Every structure is written in C-alpha cells, then in structure tokens.
Amino acid sequence: MNPPAILLPGATLGVMGGGQLGRMFVHAAQRMGYFTAVLDPDAQSPAGRVSHHHLHGEYLETRHLAELARIADAITTEFENVPAAALEQLAVHRPVAPGGEAVAIAQDRIREKAHFTRCGVACAPHAVIETDEHLALVADSLLPGILKTARLGYDGKGQLRVATREALVQAWNDLGRVPCVLEQMLPLAAECSVVVARGADGRMVHLPPQRNLHRDGILAVTEVFDGVLPDAAAAQAVASTQAIAEGLGYVGVLCVEFFVLQDGSLVVNEMAPRPHNSGHWSLDACDVSQFELQVRTLAGLPLAVPRQHSPAIMLNLLGDLWRGGSTPAEPDWTSILALPGMHLHLYGKTDARVGRKMGHLTVTGPTAAAVRERALKACEVLG
Ligand code: ADP
Ligand code: MG
C-alpha cells in the first residue's frame, strides 16, 4: 500500500519482532498516545511484554499476519531477518515501513554491497563466493580477509578471518558453503555509524554521527560528542547515509555503519533497516530519539531535526556482567545509579547468557570530559 496518511495518536502501530528494539519502539509509541501490537514467536519477548497486543507466532504464518494487519493501522520491523515475504503480505492490507524490498537488500550482504556501489558509496574490496570456481578466482589482494555469510550474520557471528587460500577454503567449508562475501581486511582507525530517518515525502533528518567500539565483534561502546570523529569523515558518513536511503526510496529509520581507515578515507560496512544499538544514546541525550523518529515516519508525522543536548557515552550491558554461575548476580545497580548522569535501560530478559545484550547504560554530563570520567567510574563498578 501507499505510504500512510497521517495516523494520529490513538491509532495502533504494529511491529514485527519482539526484541529490545521493538520494546523501545513500543515505549516511544505509547508515550505519544499510540496503541501497539507486536508479533514475535517468544511469549516472553522484551517488546511483547510491554505491548498492548502481543501475537505469539511465526513471522510467516498467514493467520498471525492477518491478525496483525487487522489490529494495526501501520506496521514496521525491528530486525532485518523478518522474512521480506511477510512484510509484502502485510503491505497488501496496511502501510508497511520500511518496505519489504529495502529489508530484503539489507538482509543480504551481496545485494547490500551492490546497492552501496550503485549509490556511489565505496565499500571494502570484496568478492562474492557462491561456488568453488569463485573461490579459485579470488584475487590475492583480498587476503588477509574476512569471510562473511551473505545472510543471517550479526554480532560477529557467521564470519571467519582468513589469512591464506587454504584457510579460505577451510572457512567456506566451515560456514557450510553458503553464499558468502570475502572482504579484504582493512586497517581501521575508527568505526562510526549514522542514523537517518526518511519520511514518505522524501524529507530526511539524521542523528549526529556516532563513534563505535566493538569487542569480539559486538558493539561495546558508542561515543557521541564534538571532535569524537574527524570532521571530514563525519560529514561524508552523513552524505553517504542520505544517498543510500534515497537510493532505496526508503521510508523509516535506517542506520549505516562505516569504517574510517588509517589514511582518513571512509568505507561503508553494512546497514540496518531499523533503529540501531549505536543510536540508543539518543533516548537520553537527544530531544528526538531514533525510536520516536521510527514512530513519526510510520505515522506520517513531521520529522523534527534532532538536537543533541548532552555529550553521551553508551555502554552495552552484556550477559557477561551477570556473575555467579547457576544463580547469576545482578550488577550493582545501586552504586551505578549513585553516580551522576546515569540512564539505565534493561530489556527485561531473564536469561543472562554470555554475549547477550541485556541492557545499556547511557552516560550524560556537562562536557565530554565529564562524561568520559563518569563512564570510567561506571565501568569500575561494573567490573
Ligand atoms: P556484524 O553483522 O556481525 O555486525 P560486521 O560486518 O559489521 O558484522 O563485522 C563486525 C566487526 O568486524 C566490525 O564492526 C569490524 O570491527 C570488524 N570488521 C568487519 N569487516 C571488516 C573488514 N573488512 N576489515 C576490518 N575489520 C572488519
Ligand atoms: Mg556490524
């Protein structure tokens, strides 16, 4: 269906997926007076537990999709592995943003890289590996590299580092000989990302570019304040993100991740057709968060230009912090919250597994130096 006419508060907004991103979308929508509906197979999903309606079921089951389309006036998605076919099925009945085609491109590194190139945005030198012939034809210049599955990778999963041709052959076997992309290992100076929101009328607003630090392939820290990234790279990241959104005819919130190389040049890494972990700080340090932007794009409301009102550092809280074997102990929230400028977000997950995103902590303060100091103290308490 065509992009939504304006849906005013009181309407029901639906979301495919019940993880933490869906939960924060639901919070933002409810705060503005919307009703919410979540479709997720897990009865205990973080978003399902706080939504007005929670449909438990598989994303492709016609019965659940029909019910979601009946309850919700417009529907969005909170993770990119929702089958594009499900979004297309919903779009027969209701406005869906982002559309199935944009999500399908973001689901597949091969199509994603082709889209970046089409938009004139440079990505890492790479080769598509789908057959033994492709493997044999790989240029030596791509090694050492990273072999990544085209689909379903996240948080560093579904990728292997390879230094030699023998290792490459072995890695492709280990990844199950599924379609992959081999990327040249690049000399990174920094990583950054940009969150953009684009309305049905083509108008775009964006959050300030954020600097990201990963640990073991998982986002650990995001920093957003003046000077955290070289000005030229930050400006280029914004322009590239806008070109990528424009090229998709995108409606909704899109996050694009970049590498800043040691020579100062910028290379696009990947995109997410939804709010992103690296934009969570906007809930506490911006007057319009990425989740409110998602609500506004879905409801056809005007997109206000976000203004950052505090320097911010976001620390991801992974399950590793819940110590104590069979009865894991919670981190010391009392000591954390005794520090100034702490904004604690927990996603309501009960099972604190290693590497699982349980929540995040945004640290704000009057200056970047104060925020750094407070974040360091928080890290000391977290251990
Ligand atoms: P995921 O989908 O799991 O986030 P990414 O493709 O973003 O996978 O890779 C995870 C991390 O691995 C990146 O954030 C970066 O730190 C590192 N990385 C990925 N590709 C490259 C590359 N071509 N060169 C150097 N480092 C890379
Ligand atoms: Mg990534």
Image: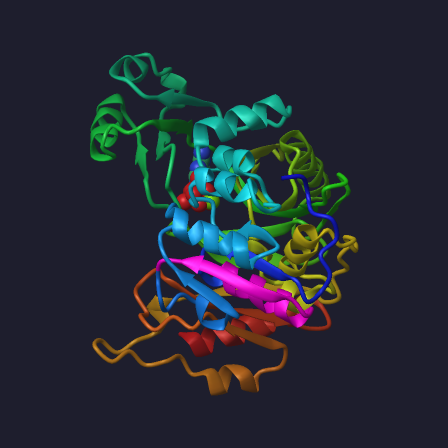
Within the image, what quadrant is residue 372 found in?
bottom right
Highlighted magenta segment, given as a residue range: 21-41
Front residue of 253/146: it is 253
Residue at screen point 58% across, 23% down: 117
Residue 303, image x and y in percent?
76, 53
Residue at screen point 67% across, 46% down: 196
Residue 64, image x and y in percent?
41, 53
Q: Verify whether residue 37 appears in magenta.
A: yes
Residue 348, image x and y in percent?
42, 73
Above or below, 29 against 211 in this view is: below
Above or below, 115 against 345 in this view is: above
Residue 198, image x and y in percent?
70, 44
Front residue of 265/309: it is 309
Q: Considering the image in quadrants, where does the N terminus appear?
A: top right
Within the image, what quadrant is residue 191 found in?
top right
Count up the numbered dots. Answer: 0
Front residue of 6/130: it is 6
Q: Is residue 114 left or right of residue 170?
A: right
Q: Is residue 113 left or right of residue 202?
A: left
Q: Verify whether residue 13 appears in magenta.
A: no
Q: Considering the image in quadrants, where does the C terminus appear?
A: bottom left
Does residue 318 appear in the picture of this structure? yes
Above or below, 205 against 357 in this view is: above
Front residue of 336/153: it is 153
Q: Is residue 96 left or right of residue 320?
A: right
